[in-house]
Amino acid sequence: MTRVPDLEGIVSHGLCTGCGLCASLVGEDRLGMAVTSYGQMRPQRKQALDAATLDRIRAVCPGIRVRGPDLEQVGAGGVFHPVWGPVRSIQRGFAADASVRFRAAAGGALTALGVFLLESGAVDAVLHVRASESAPLLSDAQVSTSAAQVKSGAQSRYGPAAPLLPVHRLLDAGQRFAVIGKPCDVAAIRNLARIDPRVEAQIPYCLTIFCGGVPTWHTARKIAAHHGVEESEIAVFRWRGHGWPGPTHIETRDGRSYDLSYEQVWFAPGSAWHYDIQFRCKICPDAIGELGDVTCPDGWILQDGRPIHEEAPGVNLLIGRTERGERLIAQAAAAGAIVLQPCALAELDAMHADHLPRKLSHPARVAGLRSLGEPAPRFQNFRRWRMLWRAGLSRSLRAFAGTRRRVRAGAHREPLR
């Protein structure tokens, strides 16, 4: 790839994912994380960074480097699907605790697995995100050491966060912990493992989701403004949960409350907001969590072969990606932490067809970046030629041309503050 000159270059060229691992690596006294005018969480330098430090940041940054899964990890009983990646097992499931299932964004499977890992003694802590108490539109990294703390984060958080900020503090303290995060957060942990041998011993589990991309902070503000609510008035902003998929719910400090359904928020025509995801998400090779030990997307109900979003008891899919992940699912089910039901791999094609455009087109989009001499990420082991073949010539050419058009218009560029 065209080399990104420095940390500011990663941000200004639209490649930052906002995970916060760089600040964790360097130390928050030298590098902080803050929401910029663009509306995303980005690193902010407090001190000059030397060349060796910048090289370490480049080595772990998931914005510029992601290595996909190896074929060997599926084992004899698994499947390495050309689109959906390594699948050792796939089942529907949900938290056995009805209150967790209700509160969570879908079936509460990730929350239930986090609680099980703590209560079984498999880990000392779980690193995840939860709604910020001081700024309800944002999310904070949470290090949970109790079931109650894990449950406090049981909901979807769309928008800026820096979930990996505590990673080095936990590693330095000798803590053994699980990470629950977005696929790019897991990719960052896998990158870190290549330069820090502590990761393999101290982070035994990475659990993730199917990700639609990270919208800006401005999206939540626009939804609040639709109800005539100022950001300073908001006490609670819940994207999903309290049902499946659950409403986008706002509570004000003076007791008013407002709800919009999932369909109203994301599919209603004429709304004042749109899903304004960051540029790096648009070229992502792995929004489906191929690098996780366990991946837990929504287990959408299908009607006439298409997913519907009517309220129902929440259901996840639990995809075991590694031997460790497959074993965790089985152990949690045996302990009564989760309830499992059969699911066929083929159901993913209809249930999550919305992931196909980015998955199949990412090689063409990256090529579009490179064709204009722009810094582009290095994605390995994501079956580039098979994606191009499945996408077809027409789709790939449209993706290539569309990326060039957006880049020429400067749509990938971000302000640093």
Image (spheres, grey):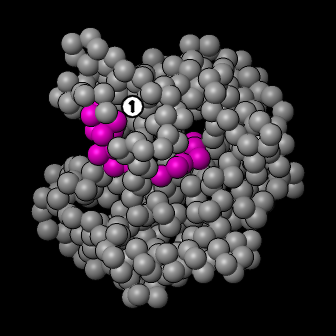
Residue drawn 75% across the image and 48% down it: 350
x, y percent for residue 24 = 31, 52
Residue segment shown in magenta: 201-225
Closest to the observer: 249 or 325? 249
x, y percent for residue 401 = 51, 80
Residue 397 appearing in the image: yes
Q: Label 1 neighbourhood size at 10 Å, few (<14), some (14-19), many (20+)?
A: many
Q: Would you identify the image quadrant in which residue 379 lies? A: bottom right
Q: Give the left or right position of residue 45, taking residue 226 as reference.
A: left
Farthest right residue in view: 77
Residue that carries the numbered disc 1 in the rendered image: 130
Residue drawn 58% across the image and 59% down it: 286
Reply above or below: 311 against 305.
above
x, y percent for residue 234 = 25, 25
Residue 111 appearing in the image: no
Which SS class for mark 1?
strand
Residue drawn 71% across the image and 56% down it: 84
Q: Give the left or right position of residue 6, taking residue 378 as reference.
A: left
Reply above or below: 6 against 330.
below
Residue drawn 57% across the image and 29% down it: 245
Residue 217 magenta-highlighted: yes
